[in-house]
Image (cartoon, rainbow, N blue to C red):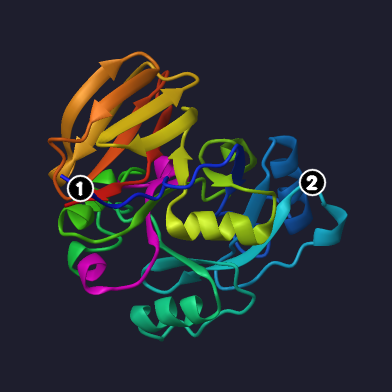
Amino acid sequence: MAIRLNPYAQRYPLWLKGNLHAHTTLSDGELPPDETLEAFIRRGYDYAALTDHDVVATPAEERYPQILFLPGVEHSAQQHILRVNVTTTLPRDLSYQSVIDLTLQADGLVILNHPNWGDDFNHWRDAQLFSLERFHGIEIYNNVIEYLEGSPYATDRWDRLLSAGRQLWGYANEDTHRILQIGSAWNMVNVRQRSKAEVLEALKTGRFYASTGAVLEEIAVQDGFWFVRSGNAKALRLISHQGEVLEEVKGSTATFSLSRARVYARVEAVGDGFARAWTQPVFVE
Ligand SMILES: [Zn+2]
């Protein structure tokens, strides 16, 4: 077993908390753009994207130096694609692959949204997920689906893609529509310094973890072992090929051997109630 790709190879002291998927009154959200940013600031968020359906919100960003604002849009054709760090929309009849590629050309982050939304748990079919290329990842958790049909979780889809050798990151997104959702899901990026460029680079290269409440204080992968320390987890799990749990440790720290990992390995932290945290995968060969 050798490590082929470790997104945590570089480690920095600074972790920043942020929201990547939020709606305002420009589409079907509850708060206007400025008030949405104010709500995130009150919750202690360091960065936030506003991603209305097919419209780009432009809050008075200069009034909010406390938060790094990322412009964006939820491209809402039959299936939804999150485009972050873009300032223009795209026609809804474009192919999904073109939407992905044009977003990459604009230096954007591309995430396929809530794969398990719908009474058939199939907003994105596996055939679509497998045929599209070059997107950064998928939503492995989307809070708004707690209120709709289907499952808010999509780690099953992620494990299938990863098992096939796809290099994709998993994001936990609030998909904020209502005030009461604020603080339900976020992504913690590990960065050298507080800047939009650093946040985006970490989100694109996997130097972050996704959370619905569990906190990870240290993530280190070295010499065939994965060390993880959580502030509040009750259990930590090492997961590999096809989602198999290779090992589960009670408590908030663990050192896992990667000797049985196949294709990839990732760690999930189980906190109180539904609180979880998901590391990004390390790829092995
Ligand atoms: Zn949305």
Query: Given the image, on which type of amino acid does mark 1 rest?
Result: Ala
Q: Is residue 133 magenta?
A: yes
Residue 60 seen from this side: no
Magenta residues span 128-150
- With 251 as the anchor, is 128 left or right in this view? left
* Residue on which the image places disc 2: 66
Residue 78 horizontal/vertical position (percent): 37, 72
For the residue labelled by badge 2, is the local secondary structure a helix, a strand or a loop? loop
Residue 192 horizontal/vertical position (percent): 62, 48
- Mark 2 / mark 1, whichever is N-terminal: 1
Residue in the foreground of this view, choosing between 264 and 78: 264
Residue 114 horizontal/vertical position (percent): 37, 54
Residue in the foreground of this view, choosing between 242 and 181: 242
* Residue on which the image places disc 1: 2
Q: Residue at x 64, y 52 (%)?
A: 48
Q: Residue at x 22, y 36 (%)?
A: 239
